[in-house]
Image: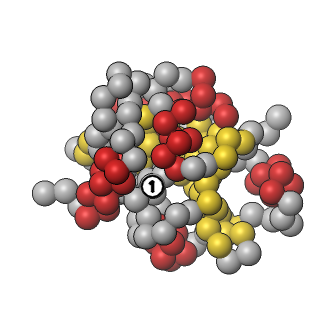
Amino acid sequence: MSHPNVTAVQHALDAADARDSSGAGCQVIELDDGVHTAVAAAQALGVEVGQIANSLIFEVGGEPLLVLTSGRHRVDTARVAADLGVPKLHRASPEFVREHTGQPIGGVAPLGHPKPVRTLIDTALAEYDQIWAAGGVPRAVFPITYPELLRVTSAAPAQVAAA
């Protein structure tokens, strides 16, 4: 039986009619082991590390900001803060992440949260026909396209890595 977080993510994908690169409905899959890093996820899936959409939660003025970034680089927090017109992004605590997403660090999905979370998606992910995102727990992932991920999350595309 699936974890409740995985079920919530799958329900959110189904409700949004989310599609993967083949045009089929997105399906959350559960791997044998947790994949806490983009490198581990890419190895488990047999894909490039850049195809992994890392989910990072930051705290901005007491509110969550989800940044989905390509696994091949790191978020330039100063750049993102400047683009958003805020002084600084604060890395969220595990408690803050769980409070706002209902999910643990290492498994935060781009959707399926108790309420919508402001989301930015790395434009570098657009280079891939299919990307993989977390499915609510560290061992769950799902395939999706960049345009679909933008659509189902109502996210803003952003350059989030250093220039």
Q: How many numbered tags mark residues here?
A: 1
Q: Quadrant of residue 4?
A: bottom left
Residues 96 and 114: in front is 114
According to the image, what is the colour scheme of the structure? secondary structure
Q: Find numbered disc 1 in the image and state the secondary structure of the residue it sits on.
A: loop
Q: Which quadrant of the structure image shows residue 108?
A: bottom left
Q: Which residue is mark 1?
A: 111
Residue at image position (36%, 42%) is: 17
Would you say 2 lies left or right of 121 here?
left
In the image: residue 144, left or right of residue 6: right
Give coordinates of residue 8: x percent, y percent: 31, 60
Q: Residue at x 67, y 41 (%)?
A: 157
- Horizontal side of residue 52 vs 12, given as left or right: right
Residue found at x 83% / y 51%:
83
Q: Quadrant of the N terminus?
A: bottom left
- Tell which of 18 and 126 is nearer to you: 18
Q: Measuring 39% from the left and 40% from the top, which residue is drawn there?
A: 18
Q: Position of residue 127 (x, y in %)?
A: 60, 23
Indicate the position of residue 129 as horizontal and vertical percent values: 49, 22
- Image quarter hosting the C terminus: top right
Taking the image as drawn, is residue 6 in sight?
no
Q: Is residue 156 left or right of residue 49?
A: right
Q: Amino acid at mark 1?
A: Leu
x, y percent for residue 71: 56, 38
The quarter of the picture where residue 103 lies is: bottom left
Q: Nearer the viewer, residue 120 or 39?
A: 120
Would residue 82 be visible to someone looking at this image? yes
